[in-house]
């Protein structure tokens, strides 16, 4: 039996990583065999590509190069991590996936949406999430959170975070268009609320999906193990 594939999407600082980790803890505590990964990244090759993509010094990167790099990292991630885990019946939680490319490179950069759909299909071999949690937040609020975190860590914004506000607003509009086109897959959650409230919403969606589709094969950790 195949596993279950859940992705977390949204603009900068919307709380994807926070919510993914909370769900992972919840699922593992309940005895599910769940793994986490992220896009771009998640593999040794993907980590190198992520470094290139987010380095704020790479100001001259062409939009087409950017698109190819995101897809290259994703192809490796699906091949090396996601597909094997799903085939083993595990629950996979992924921080960003194909919708990010539609929102950022499609709506944000203005690249052709049909081309992006074909490249996403190539990179994923047609794999689609069972559920996508879309954390929706005003980009100004999200960027403020990202800035606060960067200041705490004495770091700086990455290359994409440094884009102008209008870019991030187009990304948000892109995500909303994706959700409107696929309401069955994409759950839109108001990310301006407190972390615990959002966490409850995410759990309810995932628990409902597990009930509806039945447990993914092999995901339940045996009582003896
Ligand atoms: N990208 C990615 C593309 O352009 N195309 C693609 O195809 C893909 C896959 C990746 C970048 O690449 C772009 C998008 C990105 O710009 P990333 O690090 O994976 O970079 O993504 P980011 O959005 O940059 O991740 P962040 O870590 O900045 O944001 P998160 O994960 O959404 O937010 P999180 O959980 O780290 O929280 C941020 C801060 O807010 C606080 C947290 O404690 C933290 O300090 N917070 C809250 N504060 C108040 N209320 C809440 N509800 C909060 N939830 C979290």
Image (spheres, rainbow, N blue to C red):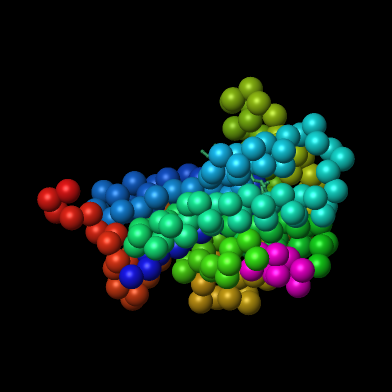
State whether the magenta stretch is mostly helix, strand or loop.
helix
- State left or right for residue 120 relative to residue 6: right
Q: Where 29 sits versus 57, above or below?
A: below
Residue 29 location in percent, x, y?
Answer: 26, 49
Between residue 62 and residue 46, name the one nearer to us. 46
Residue 91 location in percent, x, y?
Answer: 38, 58
In the picture, which quadrant includes the N terminus?
A: bottom left
- State left or right for residue 178 relative to residue 187: right
Q: Which residue is drawn at 74% across and 54% down?
A: 68
Q: Give the range drawn in magenta.
A: 113-121
Residue 28 location in percent, x, y?
Answer: 29, 49
- State left or right for residue 192 relative to residue 101: left
Which residue is situated farthest in the top direction here?
154
Corner quadrant of residue 143: top right
Q: Which residue is drawn at 43% across and 57% down?
A: 84
- The answer to whether residue 156 of the structure is visible from this angle is yes
- The answer to whether residue 176 of the structure is visible from this angle is no
Residue 160 location in percent, x, y?
Answer: 74, 44
Corner quadrant of residue 219: bottom left
Between residue 31 and residue 119, name the one nearer to us. 119
Q: Does the magenta run of residues contain 120?
A: yes
Q: Where 57 sits versus 119, above or below?
A: above
Corner quadrant of residue 212: bottom left
Q: Does the magenta run of residues contain 42?
A: no
Q: Where 11 sits versus 182, above or below?
A: above
- State left or right for residue 9 relative to residue 219: right
């Amino acid at each position: 039996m195949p596993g279950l594939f859940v992705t977390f999407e949204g603009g900068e600082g919307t709380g994807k990583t926070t919510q993914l980790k909370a769900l992972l803890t919840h699922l593992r505590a309940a005895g599910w065999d769940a793994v986490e990964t992220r896009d771009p990244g998640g593999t040794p090759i993907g980590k190198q590509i992520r470094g290139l993509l987010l380095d704020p010094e790479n100001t001259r990167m062409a939009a087409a190069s950017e698109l190819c790099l995101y897809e290259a990292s994703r192809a490796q991630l699906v091949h090396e991590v996601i597909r094997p885990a799903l085939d083993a019946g595990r629950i996979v939680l992924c921080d960003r996936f194909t919708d990010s490319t539609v929102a950022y490179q499609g709506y944000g950069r203005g690249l052709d949406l049909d081309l992006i759909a074909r490249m996403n299909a190539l990179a994923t071999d047609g794999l689609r999430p069972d559920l996508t949690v879309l954390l929706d937040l005003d980009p100004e609020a999200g960027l403020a959170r990202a800035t606060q975190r960067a200041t705490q860590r004495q770091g700086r914004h990455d290359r994409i975070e440094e884009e102008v506000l209008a870019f991030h607003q187009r990304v948000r509009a892109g995500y909303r268009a994706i959700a409107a086109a696929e309401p069955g897959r994409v759950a839109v959650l108001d990310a301006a609320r407190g972390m615990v409230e959002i966490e409850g919403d995410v759990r309810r969606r995932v628990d409902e999906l597990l009930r509806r589709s039945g447990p993914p094969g092999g995901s339940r950790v045996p009582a003896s193990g």
